[in-house]
Image (cartoon, rainbow, N blue to C red):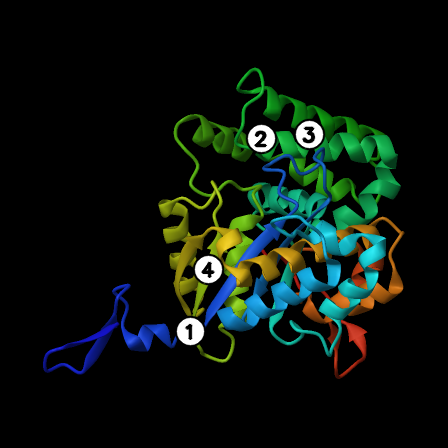
Amino acid sequence: MEHKIGGCGVTWNRAGRTAAADRIPEVACDESGSDGENLTGGNTDVFAHGSVLLPVDSAAGFVQETRDRIRSPAEEYKANHLLREKHRVVLEWLLAPSGPIHGHAHVHLTEKAFFVVDRALDLLLGDGTEAVALFRQGPLTFGPEGWREFLQATNRLLRVRNDGEPQLPVETFFRTIHELLRAHSGTELAGILERLAATRSRADAYRAGILHGPTLVPLLNPLLPAIVRTAAYWSAGGRTVRLVHDRQNMLTPDRIAWIEESARRSGFGLGGLRLVQAGLDPRVQLADFLAGIARKIASDELNGRGDPVLTALVRPYVDAASVWGDERSWARLGPVDDSTDEPRALSGSPIL
């Protein structure tokens, strides 16, 4: 039911929103691949944030059609239902250019190991412009074991959680940097290692800040910047959108306020973010499908076992501003620049 407010011409509905506000498009969102801040030793190597812009009744119809095609007795469908080989036809139907979500959905990808490297260089060196070079040359220069030790030490340095002595993450990180510098002093990466070795004061200040109070925006959590990027994508062209997101413990009122403020400062048209229970909103269920499917397809591509058909089907949904460092897999996953027929390169650090 709607009510007029006398004399002002403003209409309010039962939920307390103006009719004009109700005309703001709502984009439903969900994620896949969250391992908290354990980005180098968790269960997944890719984080995906899916979003869908569809009317509720249309989304409900597409979810029901998915159920009718798969015919599983499960009460709530997840991406893994669609990823089973016996349901390959349904998966291809969902993603196809003629399918239900094409042109109405988007996914932002984060390659977790690259995210760690980028965040570390941004914190310690003041920007992440050398992250791509370090990430791509590091495994070859340091060897598999050396690269793994570097990633793990960097992850421990940046994460909010403190394991053991408060200064242990700093000690471990700089010991690792000095060992790598001694072993690879004559390589192209020596300059980056030398600059990192000189940032002890910044690392100490960062860890001290963590110890002295709660962290509003954990540096290693990819969800918050992914949501801001989602708002940027859907508000392109000057329109305003609202985001509807599956409930997450990470999305506290203070962090939602940070997301809204970050979007405002960046000039994105974000008209608010509200949380819902995924099982009660078919739009969020479709976003969950897309996030889980895209995460699996991207991870397979990253690890050299990609399915060319599925990669080609998911590619039109992938955000050009995804956080991705691996060149080979991005050449297959990244959106194509229409003017060059080449994958769009990741320019600088796309992380807010």
Can you see residue 352?
Answer: no
> Secondary structure under badge 1?
loop
Rendered view: 11 above or below 125: below
Going by the numbered disc 2, the residue's amino acid type is Arg
Residue displayed at 18% across by 83% down: 9
The numbered mark, 2 or 3, whose residue comes first in the sequence reads 3
Going by the numbered disc 3, the residue's amino acid type is Ala
Mark 1 lies on residue: 240
Residue displayed at 14% across by 81% down: 8
Mark 4 or 2: the one toward you: 4
Q: x, y (%) of residue 126?
A: 56, 48
- Measured Cα–Cα span from mark 2 to mark 3: 14 Å
- Measured Cα–Cα span from mark 4 to mark 3: 36 Å
> Secondary structure under badge 2?
helix
Rendered view: 181 above or below 320: above
Mark 4 lies on residue: 244
The numbered mark, 3 or 1, whose residue comes first in the sequence reads 3
The numbered mark, 4 or 3, whose residue comes first in the sequence reads 3
Mark 3 lies on residue: 153
Mark 2, other Cα within 10 Å: few <14 / some 14–19 / many ≥20:
some
Mark 1, other Cα within 10 Å: few <14 / some 14–19 / many ≥20:
many
> Secondary structure under badge 4?
strand
Q: Which of 252 and 78 is in front in this view?
A: 78
Mark 2 lies on residue: 200
Going by the numbered disc 4, the residue's amino acid type is Val
Mark 4 or 3: the one toward you: 4
The numbered mark, 1 or 2, whose residue comes first in the sequence reads 2
| Residue 225 numbered mark, or none | none
Describe residue 38's horizontal placement relative to residue 257 as left or right: right
